[in-house]
Image (cartoon, helix red, strand yellow):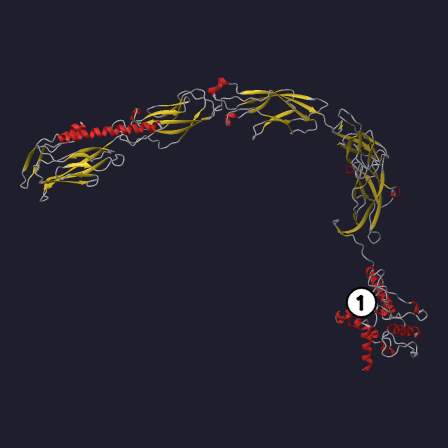
Amino acid sequence: MAALIEKQQGLGLLRVLLVLLGISVLCSVALGTRKGHASLNHRSHRHRHPGHLSLHRHRQRTGKEGQVLHRSKRGWVWNQFFVIEEYTGPDPVLVGRLHSDVDKGDGTIKYILSGEGAGTIFVIDDKTGNIHATKTLDREEQAQYTLTAQAVARDTNEPLEPPSEFIVKVQDINDNPPEFLHGPYYARVAEMSNVGTSVMQVTATDADDPTYGNSARLVYSILKGQPYFSVEPQTGIIRTALPNMDREARQEYDVVIQAKDMGGHMGGLSGTTEVKITLTDVNDNPPKFPQSVYSMSVSEDKVPGEEVGRLKAKDPDLEDNGLVNYRLIDGDGMSMFELSTDSETREAVIKIKKQVDFETKRSYSLKVEGSNPYIDSRFLAWGPYKDEATIKISVEDADEPPVFTAPSYTFVVEENAPQGTRVGQVHAKDTDVANNPVRYMIPRYTDVEQFFSISEDGMITTTRPLDRETQPWHNISVSATEIGGHHQDTKVRVNIIVKDVNDNPPEFATNNEVLMCETAEPGKVIETVSAVDKDEMVHRQHFTFSLAPEVANNQNFSLKDNRDSTASIYVLRKGFSRLTQDVYHLPIEINDNGSPSMSSTNTLTIRVCSCDSKGTILSCNVEPYVLPAGLSTGALIAILACIVILLAIVVLFVALRRQKKDPLIVFEEEDIRENIITYDDEGGGEEDTEAFDIATLQNPDGANGFLPRKDIKPELQYPIRPGIGRPAPNSVDVDDFIKTRITEADSDPTAPPYDSIQIYGYEGRGSLACSLSSLESVTTESDLDYDYLQSWGPRFRKLADLYGTKEQSIHDADDSEDS
């Protein structure tokens, strides 16, 4: 509001000055002009600028004849006129006057004005030559106008003076306030900066003419933001004004800068802008732990790597300036705990390095240091940039499983040891304060065949003799469980080595046959034998070989022990023949010289083969002897096999023929009436034609004739005895028909009961529908209405006819009789 009042006061003063200036111009015009001069002297006096109006006193002109004419004291050239902008008076402003030396004042000369704004902004009195501005001019819109003046004869328009160009310059007044074109401004300066530190420079512009007066001369001042900042009046540079401005106390400042023209004097116009200044962070604060002592606890059942607790040092600085590095520097728990830094929360994390034990040590102490990695050397005196804190860690007791006295056990037991032999003892104890007793067991999955058992005191014994050759090593686990606790258990590996006992006799390393040529010479080595033993061979133990006593004096082969666990077989004679004997069996006794000593007798098979002169074996098969019939043994065997096959085929054929001749009926002496088969299942109704001949039941009268059997031809035929319960013609009493058929079957010995009768007289026990049998219902009085059977379709038409209403049945019977 103050700036607006100053601006209005300045405009009022300006108007007063303009009025005074206009009055002075009019007075100057009234003084007149000197004779023979085309310039206005009052202009130069008014503006006090001799250069504003330039008068050419001498001008050379060339005539038509080419002569040079000299004109003295004549001038028709103007450089420029001046007019003040923003004039708001009631009358047009007089800019100036044009006058020619040839003008006698009698009105015969006419003045003409052309150019920019001629006729609109600037008008001329064609008689007097006075130029007036009819509109208010603004220098900021157009600073000058170029016009052309002419003097012509009024009646003939003949030019009396050549065209003369001049400039009308708009003279500036202070009518534009300063402006900050790029505001508002944002600036940053480091906290704790020294006084006078440059923050930024702001610049205002003024549209007024800087070359005329003080209208565009600006002075800067600060309206808001003191005492923290200041501004240089001439340059607009903003600087810090207070020392030790702390970002942590206040980070942002709003500063208002004013630019005022007229050199800052009263009456000048002003403009303002806002500058938002932010203090940037520097590392001027050391880290600080909120507490000097931290208390933490950890259970003894925690494993290494698990977290115990966290702590964090406070640093109000930002980003890298606020980073804190942590490390353990002292304490009796440095070997049991370790420290790391959480990359997200920047907290110090205490973790278990080694498992703690409540029974061994119940508390630990650590000292942690937190420090800044980036330190500003300007603020070293404000240090040190680190802090320390003490951590007290207490160990909590936990119900732990028992602990074995050894990480693993290894025992040795001899093979073939009797049941109950002690293998070894394991021991575990409860490390808790309660020290509860421990129970041992062997998990079955580690001892599937249950070779071992364990007692309450941890003694492992065998349950059966062990065989080293079957399984030389047993790996089992023993579990120890605390009695009365939380049933936590721990396991330990037990390795049981089965110690070897010499309980296996030696035997041949290979059981291959020895091939010998028929032409072998006496003393020739035909084979070198070796032995193996399933038992372990002790140091300096070897095998010895000898012939069995029963062949010790044989005349064919001999044996020599080589004293290196091998023996050589020699030929004693010559003249071996495959035809005489092709295979020899030589029993050899092998002794292992162990403790106790074990021996065995093994038979060496020697086969005689045919060889060439070089001793190469040609054939070892026995050649067949030629029989008198000219057939070999193989051929005879083939013939016998064929004969046996033929006999088998004949026997099979005869058996099949006998089976086909068996009679299809039972023997006569058997009582056929006993072969009555009762079927309790329900039949299929009319559509079931497999159980009995439904056609006969549908036409009972067809039973009067004799129906011969189709499966056999009867030897005797007996006539049917008449008059035995035969139903009357056209009778539908199925019960009488069935009884007749039964009587005939019983009296005919040639008709076995191949056609059985199935009775469907009972549907089932407890059925709400009762019986549906047509064989029983036809002779039973019933109140049931079966008229609905008429609507069930053609498949139930027969039932509908049999079980319809009595009136309908009687009517149908009458119709039958009538027909």
Q: Residue at x 83, y 46 (%)?
A: 573
Reply above or below: 773 against 316: below
Q: Residue at x 80, y 68 (%)?
A: 785
Q: Relative to the observer, which residue lies in front, 643 or 260?
A: 260
Residue nearest the viewer, comparing 516 with 536: 536
- In the rendered image of this protein, does residue 508 appear above or below residue 488? below
Q: Identify the element where label 1 is drawn.
A: loop
Tell me, yes or no, if residue 750 can be seen here.
no
Question: Residue farthest to the right?
Answer: 669
User: Is 96 placed left or right of 199 in the picture?
Assistant: left
Amino acid tagged 1: Gly
Q: Residue furthest bottom?
A: 819
Quadrant location of residue 787?
Answer: bottom right
Q: Percent from the top left, x then y, of residue 358? A: 71, 24
Q: Is residue 718 left or right of residue 262?
A: right
Specify whether residue 323 is in view: yes
- Extreme front residue here? 90
Percent of width and height locating residue 37: 10, 32
> Could you say which quadrant of the image residue 747 lies in?
bottom right
Closer to the camera in the image, 453 or 550: 453
**Above/below status of 131 relative to 299:** below
Q: Position of residue 363 (x, y in %)?
A: 68, 21
| Residue 325 in the image, given as x and y percentages of width and height | 55, 25
Q: How many marks?
A: 1
Q: Residue 254 versus residue 382: which sits nearer the camera?
A: 254
Residue depicted at 49% across the width and 19% down the height:
380
Q: Which residue is mark 1?
A: 684
Task: Report crowding for label 1: few under 14, some 14 to 19, many 20 or more residues within 10 A (C-alpha).
Answer: few
- Judged left or right of residue 9, residue 64 is left
